[in-house]
Image (cartoon, helix red, strand yellow):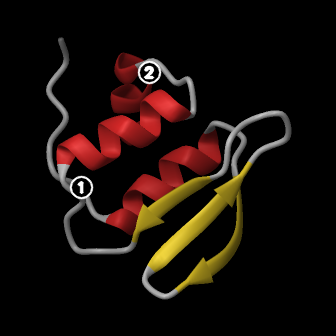
């Protein structure tokens, strides 16, 4: 299984945007992302997002973890 390192919330949002999500608004310190026919995502805009939180959002978005990690680069 590919290793998911701690990344910032801002960087995570940028990667989800590559997969067709749209940053709808920011609620507190969380970015709310939406994509037609997909569940909404709430990404914390922290310096580092815990891997288990990020992994759960990737799974919710139905994105392959390997593809997400490739999109980080």
Which quadrant is the N terminus positioned in? top left
Asked if labels 1 and 2 touch by Cβ distance under 8 angstroms, the answer is: no
Judged from the image, the secondary structure of the residue bearing numbered disc 1 is loop
Q: Furthest residue to the right?
A: 36
Q: Does residue 73 show up?
A: no
Give me the residue at 77% from left, 45% from top: 35
Left or right: 5, with 62 as reference point? left
Left or right: 18, with 20 as reference point? left
- Taking depth in this image into account, of 60 and 69 the one nearest to the observer is 60
Residue 50 in percent (x, y) is at 18, 54
Left or right: 53, with 10 as reference point? left
The answer to which quarter of the image holds residue 71 is top left
Examine the rendered structure and indicate whether residue 24 appears above or below residue 50.
Answer: below
Left or right: 2, with 41 as reference point? left
**Residue 67 has which mark?**
2
Examine the rendered structure and indicate whether residue 27 appears above or below residue 19.
Answer: below
Q: Which residue is mark 1?
A: 7
Quote the CA–CA distance across marks 2 and 1.
16 Å
The answer to which quarter of the image holds residue 31 is bottom right
Examine the rendered structure and indicate whether residue 2 appears above or below residue 3.
Answer: above
Residue 5 in percent (x, y) is at 14, 42
Give me the residue at 36% from left, 22% from top: 65
Badge 1: few (under 14), some or many (20 or more) residues near its Cα, within 10 Å?
A: some
Which quadrant is the C terminus positioned in? top left
Judged from the image, the secondary structure of the residue bearing numbered disc 2 is helix
Q: Furthest residue to the bottom?
A: 28
């Amino acid at each position: 299984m590919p290793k998911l390192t701690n990344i910032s919330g801002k960087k995570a949002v940028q990667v989800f945007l590559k997969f067709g999500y749209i940053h709808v608004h920011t609620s507190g310190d969380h970015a709310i992302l939406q994509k037609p026919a997909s569940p909404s995502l709430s990404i914390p805009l922290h310096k580092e997002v815990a891997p288990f939180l990020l992994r759960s959002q990737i799974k919710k978005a139905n994105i392959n973890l390997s593809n997400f990690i490739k999109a980080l680069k």
